[in-house]
C-alpha cells in the first residue's frame, strides 16, 4: 500500500513534484521513496532503459572527509583502492566513490538497506574517527538516477563533460558543473543499461529536476520510480 | 499569384523538391516556390529581383552572393528582422518583406537620399547634425527613425532555443571537397570527426561550380564524396550549421537552427573556402549585378534562370564556367569581359571561345552598368579597354543585358584562422591573401589555403585530415602526397576597381561606400587600416568586410605608398556571421535555491523575494497590504510568538584537534576556552581588517564547532577557510553544510510555551538552557541543534535540523503554536526587529571598507591571542584614526520626511557618510536607523544633517543602542 511522503518527518526534496506525477511511495528507512511515477513498473522499466530520471534522495548515503578518511572506512570494512575519481562497488551493493585522496562519498544500495553506511556511522566518534569526519551527504545533496541509452545525450545539454559510455568507464566519477550547479556524477550501469548517479546541492533539487526534465524531453525522457531501476539492475546488488 | 516564370526544368535544382509546392508572400504579394527554395531563389524564380534597400542611400538591392555572404538580401520575416533571404527556406504562409525603406520597397520615399550622396561622404555624420547645438534634438529624432535595419517586435513571445555540448577529436569546418576529404582521412584513422557546413547540403563548390566543359566533374566528385562521408560512421555531419568563431583551446560555437552547439575539438581543420569578390564599377550594386557563382547557385541548386541576357565579367577561368552554365540554362551571353591582359587558357575558355557569337574582351572591364528607371535593375553595360590600373579607354561598347555575372577573384574565408592566432600575408603575384602561419592543433585545406584546382583541393584536404588525426594521437599512416598544381596565382588581378566621374562604384555594399569614400578617409588623416575602418565604417556592416576588405586594403596601400602586406587587415572578431540573441540567451541556467519549507511559505501566502540565489519570504500578505503585513508580523514577535525560516544561513562544521585554534585565527574573538554547550559571536575580517562576515559558533565538542555565517557570505567564508588552511595545514576539517540543515528562529514571549508542547528530550527552561546556550537533542523524532540567541531581541530559539526534516519541523511548530496564534514572519519584519535591537547586517550596515572600530565592534576583538586574520591591519587603521563611525539615530522632528537608506549624512557642507538602515519602529513608534557619521558627531545626543530627496535636509540625533530593551531582559527570559 502506498504511503504518503508526509507520513514521516524525513521527506524527499522534490516530493511535491513526485506527488504531482501520481507517484506511489514506499517507506524505506523512515522516508517515502517513489516506487513508480504514474506508470506501471514494466512501462517505467522500459522507459528507464531509454531515458529515465529517478529520485533517489531518500535512499541512504553518507561521506567521510579528512586526511584519514579512506583508511578509516577501509578499516570499517570497505574495499577502496588508491585511484581517486573512481567508485568501488561493495558486496552489499554500497558504492564507495572516492572523490579525492581524502574524501569518499558512500551511496547505499537500491534495496535501501544501509549496510556499511550504518555500521560506519555507528563506529564513528570524534576520538575514534580523528582525521575522518562525516559529511552529511544525506541532507547536503539531492540524488538522482539517470539511466538509459539517451542519458549521455541528455547530459550533453547541461554538462560540458563527455559522458558517453565509450568515453567514460563504468564507475568513473566526474565532478563538474551541471546546469550551473556543482555536481558529482558516478557512472554505475544497471545491467547492460548505461546509468549514472547525479548528486548536487539539495537546496537546488527542484531547480535541477526541472533542468533534467527539460533536457530529457527531446529524447522522450520521463521520471521513473525506484522499481524500474531495481528491475534493470536485476539480480545485481545495486 | 506569379507563376515562377524563371523556373528551369529538371534536373536543375539540387536542393528543391518539386513535388512540394510552397506558398509565401513578400511585400504583401503572394508567390509560389518549392520546398528547399530560399526566399531569394523563390523570388527570382518569380521574376522579383529587388530584395531590399541599401542602408544609407536607399538604393534597390538584389541577389549578390546567394549564400549569405552579403547584406543585400536582409529581409524581415514576421517578427524576425535581418533574416538572410538567400539562406532562409520558404515555408507555407511565410510573410516576408524588405527592410530599410519608407513607404514601400518599390517606391521608397527615402530614395531621394541617393541623389544627395555627394553630401553624405564617409564620416559626414561626425561633422553634421550637432551644430548648431539647438538643432540636435530635431536631428536626433530623424536619425533614430532612419537608423537600423529591420524592426524588433517587443511583444513577440520568447521561443525555445537551447544549447548542447559536442565532443569530437577533429572538427572540420567546411563541407566542400577539401573538407570532405579531410574528414574522411581523419575518420579513417579512427578519429571521431564532426563535419560542419553552413549550407543546406555538403558539397561546397561542387554543388554549383563548373570545372570542366561538360559540367560533369563536380557532380561526380560530389556524389562520390557524399556517399563516402555518409558511409563513414566516425563522421557526424552538421549542415545548416555555422561555425561562428574560434575561442581558446579550439572551443567552437556551432550555430544551428535553434541550438547553439558548443564543441571543443582537439584538432580543427579549416576548409572554409573563399569569398567571391566583386568588380568595382559604376552602378555595380544594381539588382541583376551578382557574383557569377550566385548565378550558378540559382541555376544548379534551385533551378532558377538568373536573367535573360548576361554579361560575364571575370578575372579567372571560373567566369567561363559560369558562362557555359548560363548558356545551358537558356541565358544569352552577350559577351565575356576578361580583366586579364592575357587570359590563361583552359578548356572552359576554349569552349566559350568556340561560340563565335560570344565576343571575349580581354584586358577590358565594365565602365558602368546602365540602370533601369529607379535603379531597379540593369539594362546594359558599357565595356572599355583597360589602359592602366583603374583606368579605362575613353571609347566603350554597350551591351544590352539584365544580368551581370562577376567572377572578380577570391579572398580566403580565413576568419577562424585569424581568430585562432594564425597569420595572413599578401602575395603580390597572386594578388591574394594567404595563410602564412597556423597555431598548433589547427590545419587548413582547400582554397582557404590557396588550392583552387580540384586535384590540389582534394590533396590538401587529405593532408590536413591526416595531420589533424596524427596531431590528436591517431595512427594515420604515411602523409598523403601533395603534388598537384594549386592554381593560386590564376584567380585574382591586382586592381579590379575603376573610378567613375559619377562615383557609385561600390566598395562596401552594406555601408554604401564608394572608392572616393576610402580615398577621402585617408586624406582626412585616418590612414591606418583600423582608423580607416572606424571613420568610414568600411567592413562594419552585416557582411563584416567579406567583399569590402580586399578593395579597401588595396586602396589604403596605394594611397599610403605601402604594399598590401604592410598594410595588413583589420582584426576579425567573432561572431563571423549573424547570430540571434535567442541563440546566445537560451537556454540559460539560472540556479535557484529554496529551503525545505518553501511550499509552506507559498501555502501561507508569502511574497517571495530573491536573496542571492535563494528564494525567501519577504512578508506574508499581498502587495496591496505590504506595510500592514510587516507591522502585523513585527507585533506578533514582540507580543506573542513568530517563526522565521533561516535555513539560508551558512552552516559550517569545523572538526579536528585544531578546530579551536582554527577559529581563533579566522575570527576576531576567542574560542579556545569556549565551554561546551555555549554559543559565541563570530566576526570575520579579511587581511585588510575589513569586516566580511559574522555569525555564531556553537561548541558541541572540544574538537567540534558548528558555525553559522550570513546567507550571502556562506560560500565565501567556506572558500576563505579552505584557502587559509591550505597554507596553515592545521589538523582541521571544514565542511560547508549550509544545505544540510533547515533552520528556524522562533521568537517572542510565548516561544518557550510553544516549544514545550513538542515532545523533546531537551530541558527548555531558562535555568537549564540559558541565553547563548546550545543543546543537541530531538524535537519529536527530529534530531535538532538548538541555540538560544537573540537577533530579534525576544526570547527565542534557533533550531537547526537535517534539511529533509525541515518541513516536518515547521509543521510541528505550527501545530504546537496554533493555540497561541503563532505567525510566520519574513525578512522585512526581521530587519525591523533587529534594527530595534541595533544589530548590524553585514553588507548592509557594513561595506567594503568597514572595520570593527568603525562599526563599534571593538568588543569582538580578542587581544589575548597571538593572531587573527586582519589584526595587524586593524591596528594600523586604529593608529591612523577613524574617518567615520556607525551610530544609531532617530529623527529630531518625528514628523519630518523619512529618510531612505543610502541618503547622505553631512557635517556642514561636507559629506561624512550615509544611512545604512532606516525603518519606522512599530514597537517604539518612531523612525530609527543606523548610519555613518564623522567620529566627532558620534556622541549620543549629537544632531546631524541628513540630505534626503530633492536636496531637503532633515535632522537626525545620535541615539544610544539598542533602541529596544537596552538591558536585554526580554531575550534572556
Image (cartoon, helix red, strand yellow):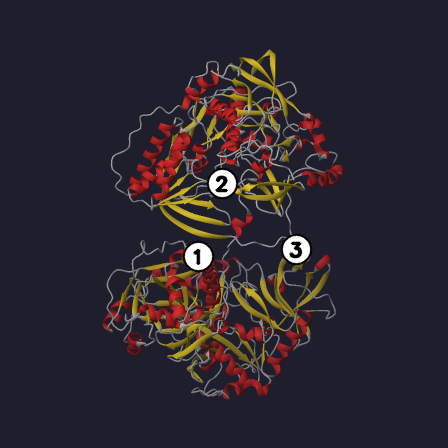
Classify mark 3: helix, strand or loop: strand
Using the rendered image, report if marks 2 and 1 lie on a common chain: no
Asked if residue B170 can be seen in this view, the reply is no
What secondary structure is found at the residue carrying circle 2? loop
Q: Nearer the viewer, residue A47 or B275?
A: A47
Q: Nearer the viewer, mark 1 or mark 3?
A: 1
Image-based side of B488 in relation to B570, left or right: left
Chain bearing mark 3: B
Residue B704 visible to an observer of this rendering: yes
Mark toward the viewer: 2 or 1: 1
- Checking the image for residue B910, the label placed there is 3
Circle 1 crowding by C-alpha within 10 Å: few under 14, some 14–19, many from 20: many
Indicate the quadrant containing the C terminus of chain A: top left, top right, bottom left or bottom right: bottom left
* Tag 1–tag 3 contact (CB < 8 Å): no
Residue B574's label in the rendered image is 2
Q: Is residue B921 above or below residue B582?
A: below
- On residue A203, the disc is none
Residue count near mark 3 (Cα–Cα under 10 Å), binned few <14, some 14–19, many ≥20: few
Same subunit: marks 1 and 3: no
Looking at the picture, does residue B890 appear above or below residue B946? below
Q: Cα distance, mark 1 to mark 3?
A: 53 Å
Query: Looking at the picture, does residue A164 appear above or below residue B422?
Result: below
Q: Position of residue B761 (x, y in %)?
A: 42, 87
Residue drawn at 51 percent across, 55 percent down: B588
| Inter-mark Cα distance, 2 to 3 | 49 Å
Give the position of the N terminus of chain A as an image quadrant: bottom left
Residue B861 vertical position relative to residue B964 in the rendered view, above or below: above
Instruction: Indicate the quadrant where residue B803 lies.
Output: bottom left
Which residue is denoted by mark 1 in the rendering?
A158
Amino acid at each position: 500500500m502506498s504511503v504518503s511522503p508526509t507520513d514521516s518527518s524525513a521527506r524527499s526534496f522534490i516530493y511535491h513534484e513526485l506527488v504531482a506525477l501520481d507517484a506511489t511511495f514506499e517507506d524505506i528507512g523512515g522516508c517515502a521513496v517513489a516506487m513508480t511515477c504514474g506508470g506501471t513498473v514494466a512501462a517505467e522499466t522500459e522507459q528507464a532503459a531509454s531515458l529515465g530520471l529517478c529520485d533517489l534522495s531518500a535512499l541512504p548515503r553518507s561521506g567521510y572527509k579528512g586526511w584519514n578518511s579512506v583508511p578509516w572506512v577501509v578499516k570499517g570494512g570497505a574495499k577502496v583502492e588508491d585511484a581517486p575519481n573512481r567508485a568501488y562497488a561493495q558486496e552489499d551493493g554500497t558504492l564507495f566513490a572516492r572523490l579525492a585522496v581524502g574524501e569518499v562519498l558512500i551511496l547505499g544500495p537500491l534495496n535501501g538497506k544501509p549496510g556499511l553506511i550504518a555500521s560506519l556511522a555507528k563506529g564513528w566518534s570524534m576520538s575514534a574517527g580523528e582525521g575522518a569526519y562525516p559529511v552529511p551527504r544525506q541532507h547536503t545533496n539531492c540524488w538522482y538516477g539517470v539511466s538509459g541509452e539517451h542519458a549521455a545525450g541528455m547530459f550533453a545539454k547541461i554538462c560540458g563533460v563527455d559522458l558517453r559510455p565509450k568515453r567514460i568507464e563504468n564507475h568513473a566519477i566526474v565532478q563538474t558543473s551541471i546546469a550551473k550547479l556543482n555536481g558529482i556524477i558516478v557512472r554505475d550501469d544497471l545491467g547492460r543499461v548505461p546509468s549514472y548517479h547525479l548528486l548536487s546541492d539539495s537546496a537546488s533539487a527542484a531547480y535541477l529536476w526541472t533542468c533534467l526534465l527539460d533536457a530529457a524531453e527531446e529524447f522522450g525522457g520521463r521520471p521513473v520510480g525506484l522499481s524500474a531501476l531495481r528491475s534493470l539492475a536485476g539480480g545485481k546488488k545495486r | 499569384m506569379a507563376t515562377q516564370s524563371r523556373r528551369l526544368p529538371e534536373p536543375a535544382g539540387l536542393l528543391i523538391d518539386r513535388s512540394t509546392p510552397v506558398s509565401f508572400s513578400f511585400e504583401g504579394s503572394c508567390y509560389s516556390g518549392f520546398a528547399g527554395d530560399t526566399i531569394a531563389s523563390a523570388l527570382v524564380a518569380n521574376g522579383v529581383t529587388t530584395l531590399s534597400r541599401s542602408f544609407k542611400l536607399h538604393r534597390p538591392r538584389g541577389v549578390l552572393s546567394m549564400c549569405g555572404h552579403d547584406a543585400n538580401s536582409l529581409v524581415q520575416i514576421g517578427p524576425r528582422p535581418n533574416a538572410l533571404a538567400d539562406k532562409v527556406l520558404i515555408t507555407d504562409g511565410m510573410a516576408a518583406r524588405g527592410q530599410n525603406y519608407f513607404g514601400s520597397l518599390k517606391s521608397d520615399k527615402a530614395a531621394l537620399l541617393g541623389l544627395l550622396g555627394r553630401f553624405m561622404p564617409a564620416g559626414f555624420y561626425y561633422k553634421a547634425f550637432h551644430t548648431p547645438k539647438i538643432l540636435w534634438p530635431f536631428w536626433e529624432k530623424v536619425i533614430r527613425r532612419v537608423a537600423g535595419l529591420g524592426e524588433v517586435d517587443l511583444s513577440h513571445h520568447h521561443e525555445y532555443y537551447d544549447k548542447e555540448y559536442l565532443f569530437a577529436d577533429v572538427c572540420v569546418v567546411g563541407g566542400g571537397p577539401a573538407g570532405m576529404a579531410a574528414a574522411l582521412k581523419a575518420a579513417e584513422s579512427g578519429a571521431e570527426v564532426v563535419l560542419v557546413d553552413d549550407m543546406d547540403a555538403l558539397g561546397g563548390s561542387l554543388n554549383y561550380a563548373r570545372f570542366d566543359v561538360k559540367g560533369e566533374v563536380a557532380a561526380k566528385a560530389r556524389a562520390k564524396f557524399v556517399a563516402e562521408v555518409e558511409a563513414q560512421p566516425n563522421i557526424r555531419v552538421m549542415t545548416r550549421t555555422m561555425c561562428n568563431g574560434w575561442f581558446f583551446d579550439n572551443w567552437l560555437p556551432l550555430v544551428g537552427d535553434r541550438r547553439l552547439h558548443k564543441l571543443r575539438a582537439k584538432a580543427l581543420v579549416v576548409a572554409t573556402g573563399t569569398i567571391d569578390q566583386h568588380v568595382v564599377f559604376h552602378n555595380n550594386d544594381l539588382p541583376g549585378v551578382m557574383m557569377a557563382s550566385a548565378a550558378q547557385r540559382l541555376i544548379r541548386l534551385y533551378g532558377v534562370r538568373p536573367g535573360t541576357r548576361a554579361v560575364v565579367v571575370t578575372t579567372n577561368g571560373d567566369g567561363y564556367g559560369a558562362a557555359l552554365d548560363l548558356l545551358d540554362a537558356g541565358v544569352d551571353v552577350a559577351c565575356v569581359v576578361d580583366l586579364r591582359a592575357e587570359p590563361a587558357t583552359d578548356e572552359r575558355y576554349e569552349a566559350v571561345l568556340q561560340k563565335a557569337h560570344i565576343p571575349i574582351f580581354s584586358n577590358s572591364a565594365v565602365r558602368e552598368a546602365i540602370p533601369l528607371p529607379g535603379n531597379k535593375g540593369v539594362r546594359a553595360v558599357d565595356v572599355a579597354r583597360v589602359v592602366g590600373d583603374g583606368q579605362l579607354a575613353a571609347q566603350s561598347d554597350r551591351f544590352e543585358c539584365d544580368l551581370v555575372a562577376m567572377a572578380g577573384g577570391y579572398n580566403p574565408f580565413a576568419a577562424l584562422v585569424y581568430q585562432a592566432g594564425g597569420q595572413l600575408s599578401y602575395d603580390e603575384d597572386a594578388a591574394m591573401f594567404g595563410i602564412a602561419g597556423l597555431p598548433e592543433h589547427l590545419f587548413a585545406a582547400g582554397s582557404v589555403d590557396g588550392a583552387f584546382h580540384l586535384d590540389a583541393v582534394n590533396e590538401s584536404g587529405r593532408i590536413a585530415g591526416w595531420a589533424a588525426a596524427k596531431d590528436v594521437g591517431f595512427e594515420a599512416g604515411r602523409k598523403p602526397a601533395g603534388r598537384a598544381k594549386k592554381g593560386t596565382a590564376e584567380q585574382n588581378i591586382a586592381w579590379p576597381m575603376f573610378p567613375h566621374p559619377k562615383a557609385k562604384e561600390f566598395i562596401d555594399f552594406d555601408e554604401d561606400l564608394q572608392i572616393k569614400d576610402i580615398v577621402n578617409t585617408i586624406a582626412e588623416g585616418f590612414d591606418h587600416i583600423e582608423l580607416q575602418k572606424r571613420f568610414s565604417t568600411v567592413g562594419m556592416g552585416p557582411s563584416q568586410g567579406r567583399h569590402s576588405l580586399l578593395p579597401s586594403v588595396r586602396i589604403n596601400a596605394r594611397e599610403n605608398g605601402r604594399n598590401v602586406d604592410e598594410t595588413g587587415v583589420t582584426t576579425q572578431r567573432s561572431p563571423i556571421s549573424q547570430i540571434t540573441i535567442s541563440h546566445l540567451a537560451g537556454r540559460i541556467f539560472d540556479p535557484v535555491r529554496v529551503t525545505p519549507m518553501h511550499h509552506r511559505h507559498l501555502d501561507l501566502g508569502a511574497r517571495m523575494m530573491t536573496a542571492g540565489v535563494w528564494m525567501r519570504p519577504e512578508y506574508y500578505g499581498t502587495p496591496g497590504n505590504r506595510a500592514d503585513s510587516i507591522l502585523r508580523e513585527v507585533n506578533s514577535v514582540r507580543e506573542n510568538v513568530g517563526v522565521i525560516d533561516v535555513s539560508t544561513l551558512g552552516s559550517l562544521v569545523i572538526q579536528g584537534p585544531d578546530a579551536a585554534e582554527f577559529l581563533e585565527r579566522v575570527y576576531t574573538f576567542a574560542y579556545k576556552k569556549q565551554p561546551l554547550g555555549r554559543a559565541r559571536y563570530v566576526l570575520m575580517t579579511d587581511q585588510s581588517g575589513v569586516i566580511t562576515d559574522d555569525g555564531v559558533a556553537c561548541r558541541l565538542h572540544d574538537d567540534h564547532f558548528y558555525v553559522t555565517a550570513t546567507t550571502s557570505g556562506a560560500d565565501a567564508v567556506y572558500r576563505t577557510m579552505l584557502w587559509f588552511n591550505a597554507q596553515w595545514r592545521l589538523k582541521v576539517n571544514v565542511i560547508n553544510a549550509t544545505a544540510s540543515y533547515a533552520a528556524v528562529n522562533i521568537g517572542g514571549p510565548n516561544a518557550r510555551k510553544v516549544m514545550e508542547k513538542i515532545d523533546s528530550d531537551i530541558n527548555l527552561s531558562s535555568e537549564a538552557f540559558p541565553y547563548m546556550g546550545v543543546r543537541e537533542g530531538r524535537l519529536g523524532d527530529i534530531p535538532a541543534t538548538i541555540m538560544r540567541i537573540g537577533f530579534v531581541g525576544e526570547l527565542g530559539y534557533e533550531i537547526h535540523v537535517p534539511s529533509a526534516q525541515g518541513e516536518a519541523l515547521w509543521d510541528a511548530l505550527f501545530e504546537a503554536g496554533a493555540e497561541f496564534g503563532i505567525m510566520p514572519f519574513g525578512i522585512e519584519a526581521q530587519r525591523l526587529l533587529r534594527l530595534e535591537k541595533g544589530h548590524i547586517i553585514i553588507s548592509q550596515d557594513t561595506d567594503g571598507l568597514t572595520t570593527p572600530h568603525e562599526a563599534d565592534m571593538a568588543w569582538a576583538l580578542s587581544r589575548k591571542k597571538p593572531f587573527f586574520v586582519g589584526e595587524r591591519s586593524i591596528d594600523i587603521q586604529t593608529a591612523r584614526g577613524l574617518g567615520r563611525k556607525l551610530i544609531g539615530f532617530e529623527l529630531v522632528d518625528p514628523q519630518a520626511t523619512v529618510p531612505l537608506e543610502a541618503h547622505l549624512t553631512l557635517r556642514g557642507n561636507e559629506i561624512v557618510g550615509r544611512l545604512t538602515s532606516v525603518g519606522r519602529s512599530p514597537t517604539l513608534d518612531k523612525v530609527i536607523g543606523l548610519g555613518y557619521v564623522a567620529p566627532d558627531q558620534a556622541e549620543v545626543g549629537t544632531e546631524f544633517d541628513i540630505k534626503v530627496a530633492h536636496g531637503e535636509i532633515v535632522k537626525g540625533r545620535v541615539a544610544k543602542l539598542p533602541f529596544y530593551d537596552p538591558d536585554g531582559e526580554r531575550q534572556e527570559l
